[in-house]
Image: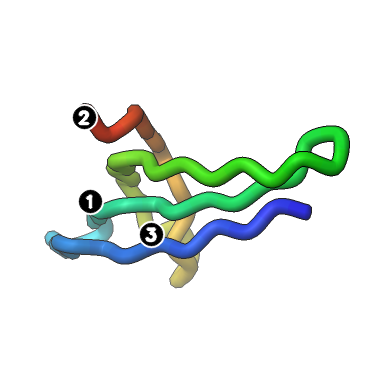
Amino acid sequence: MHLVRVRPSDVRVSGDMAYTVGLEHTSVSVDGEPHTYTLRATQVYRREEGEWKVAHRHGDTVPG
């Protein structure tokens, strides 16, 4: 099982480009063992034919 909760802290839109930054809280099960972790995530979007598409995504661990 894989569960991701996203809590954007900032959303910006400019024309056909947009980005979000925030925290992704993830819960997974690996060989029956539960694991949770949090990533800082940035996603860049481009609007194509009226739909938002992810053009780039970066996530890294939260320090400390």
Image coordinates of residue 52 in percent, x first then y, are 43, 62
Q: Secondary structure at mark 3?
A: strand
Looking at the image, is 37 positioned above or below residue 27? above
Badge 3: few (under 14), some or many (20 or more) residues near its Cα, within 10 Å? some
Residue most extreme to the bottom: 50
Badge 1: few (under 14), some or many (20 or more) residues near its Cα, within 10 Å? many
Image coordinates of residue 41 in percent, x first then y, are 32, 42
Image coordinates of residue 62 in percent, x first then y, are 27, 34
CA separation in Å, label 3 and label 2? 36 Å
Residue most extreme to the right: 31
- As shown in the figure, which amino acid type bears the numbered disc 1? Val
* Residue 29 falls in image quadrant: top right
- As shown in the figure, which amino acid type bears the numbered disc 3? Arg
3 vs 2, front mark: 2
- As shown in the figure, which amino acid type bears the numbered disc 2? Gly
Badge 2: few (under 14), some or many (20 or more) residues near its Cα, within 10 Å? few
CA separation in Å, label 1 and label 2? 19 Å
Q: Can you identify the residue that label 2 sits on?
A: 64
Q: Please identify the quadrant where the C terminus is shown.
A: top left
Residue 31 appears left or right of 24 = right
Residue 8 appears left or right of 29 = left
Q: Residue at x 33, y 45 (%)?
A: 43
Q: Which mark is residue 47?
A: 3
